Image (cartoon, grey):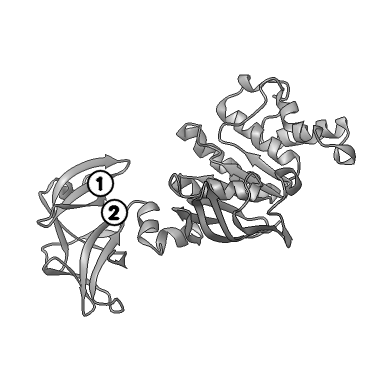
Amino acid sequence: MEVRVANVRKEFDRFPALHDVSLDIKSGELIALLGPSGSGKTTLLRLIAGLERPTKGAIFFGDEDASQKSIQERNVGFVFQHYALFRHMTVADNIGFGLKVRHGPSRPPTQEIRRRASELLDLVQLSGLEKRYPAQLSGGQRQRVALARAMAIEPKVLLLDEPFGALDAQVRRELRRWLRDIHDATGHTTVFVTHDQEEALELADRVVVMSQGRIEQVGSADEIYDTPNSPFVYGFIGESSSLPVKVDNGDIWLADRPIGLSAAHAPSGEAMLYFRPHDVELVDGCSGCIAGTVAASRRVAGTRRVELEIGGERQRVEIELPVDHPAAQKSRVAFRPRRWKLFPAA
């Protein structure tokens, strides 16, 4: 099922939570809505679900305007962060609940509901646990049950709101891989909300980066990470450092010296230079480079992060070095970014 968000604005007590947002979601696609708290990602998900109504604009399911339809009429599956399972029901009854409460001819026979629950238990790798209650399950198992319950109604769209937010890091990693496998097996159009960039980049076909009620950028994990289109996206996705620089006839200057980088098509004037800690090369001497004094050094897995103090204004940047690299202990380090991007100064 294709979903189209068309020029949607959402206000709460006249406060705009979303500003003229448009987004096309392809049938069978797995989309991540990624952003910090207050960016509007959960509001957008709730609008797609039918839990909220747009102040302006429309939500289309296929060619049909679903803006005023309820969550039941839209036939969407919704998975919450804290599972929202019925504590007094067994696993099998929780999974079959959405089918059991249907009215009239749309309600399947009891035997069919049991068969569907059993089938989904196999899919989410919980066979044999159908008679247990939620309190007898781990957090990861409960979230699998919640997903199976959402899929039981054969939804047109599957929506997940911070689905792994309440779980520890190891379980999150395991369930991310599992969710991707489930998506590939079922082909549901799936939208999930997260503030975890690693989760979004690993799982999604496309990532929608949001900030202050607007969409900043939409693209694949590679596009979002390698070619961010704004300072916000560059700073939010992955780790990065920035320095105020000046462009003069295609050369980039830091304070009173060129740093060996050329920006032939950039306009002359003030700008911000962004680069990632691992995308640098160390250089000897400093005829065209960035030089700084080591202010801090810390171990990060198999590498070492060195914090450098640059120039008289004591601006700091981070670069990544091999864990045993001698430069990590030096008082002065010179480097040059290998990959970088300029944005106009604010």
Label number found at residue 213:
none
Indicate the amino acid at tag 1: Arg
Foreground residue among 346 and 84: 346
Taking the image as shown, residue 170 lies to the left or right of residue 81, namely left
Label 1, label 2: how many angstroms apart (C-alpha)? 8 Å
Q: Residue at x 20, y 43 (%)?
A: 297
Q: Which residue is mark 2?
A: 277
Residue 45, compared with residue 152, is above or below; it is below
State which quadrant residue 57 falls in.
bottom right
Which of the marked residues, 1 or 2, is nearer the chain's N terminus?
A: 2
Q: Residue at x 31, y 64 (%)?
A: 339
Mark seen at residue 305: 1
Q: Residue at x 81, y 32 (%)?
A: 100
Residue 203 shows up from this direction:
no
Q: Position of residue 234 (x, y in %)?
A: 37, 58
* Residue type, mark 2 in image: Pro
